Image (spheres, rainbow, N blue to C red):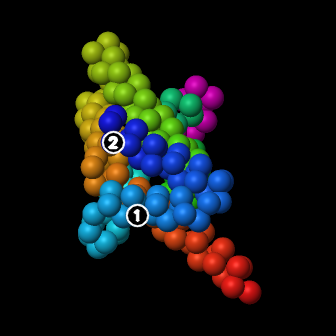
Amino acid sequence: MKYINDSLKLATIVEQKIKAQDPKQLESVKMCLMERMGTPVGLHTAGVPFILSALLSLISFSMPQLSLWGAIFQWFSWPEHAVFAGIIPTGFLYCLLIFPSMTLFSRGYMAALKFYLALIFATAALAACNLLYELIAVLTFDGHAGLLISAFIGVLFSTGSIKLINSAMFVKTSAFYLHNRVWRWQLKHHTQNAS
């Protein structure tokens, strides 16, 4: 989790310097962030590790939904053919949580990064629990092997999502987003001081 901690440290520094509102310190931080991000154009500036992480997390979240909602519908004796009435709103809600957090972090807000991290770690925990459940179901009460395979794939996707966030390229992406936030702050305050 070294790289995740690096991204969080960079975000903390930027938050503190923006609150201090010292233009010299912010310029120093901006230069430090430029050094951390390296080349100004590349996969990190396109947000590739961040976008792929979100995509893998979304797919991983989708994997256990059929089992989860199937069990809920069976428990309440609801018609099994209507299981998508639970799956679709749940997926929509997940998208409503993950995409705004991505958008806000791409604007350089640390709280959004923390929320995003909590979301992907919760998704990984859900995928791991689903794998355990499906494994027990297959071994004890004639579960479906296809659901076990999808649960395993969900764990792989969650692992990939976390690995993408815990990478040197994501630290560069974070530095790019935070650099742009400092730059926007400088432009805003330069315009206010000029008028």
User: Residue at image x 66%, y 82%?
Assistant: 191
User: Residue at image x 59%, y 65%?
Assistant: 23
User: Residue at image x 38%, y 43%?
Assistant: 6
As displayed, is residue 136 above or below residue 41?
above
Tell me the quadrant of the picture where the N terminus can be found.
top left
In the rendered image, which residue does mark 1 sit on? 31
Tell me the quadrant of the picture where the C terminus can be found.
bottom right
Q: Secondary structure at mark 1?
A: helix
In the rendered image, which residue does mark 2 sit on? 3
Looking at the picture, which amino acid does disc 2 mark? Tyr
As displayed, is residue 79 above or below residue 180?
above
Q: Describe residue 191's horizontal placement relative to residue 139 as left or right.
A: right
Residue 149: horizontal and vertical position, in percent? 25, 35
Query: From this viewpoint, is residue 88 visible?
Result: no
Residue 25: horizontal and vertical position, in percent? 53, 58
What range is drawn magenta here?
74-80
Q: Residue furthest top?
A: 140
Tell me if residue 122 is in the magenta stretch: no
Q: Residues within 10 Å of mark 2 (few under 14, many from 20)?
A: some
Front-most of 7 and 18? 18
User: Residue at image x 44%, y 31%?
Assistant: 126
Which of label 1 and label 2 is nearer to you? 1
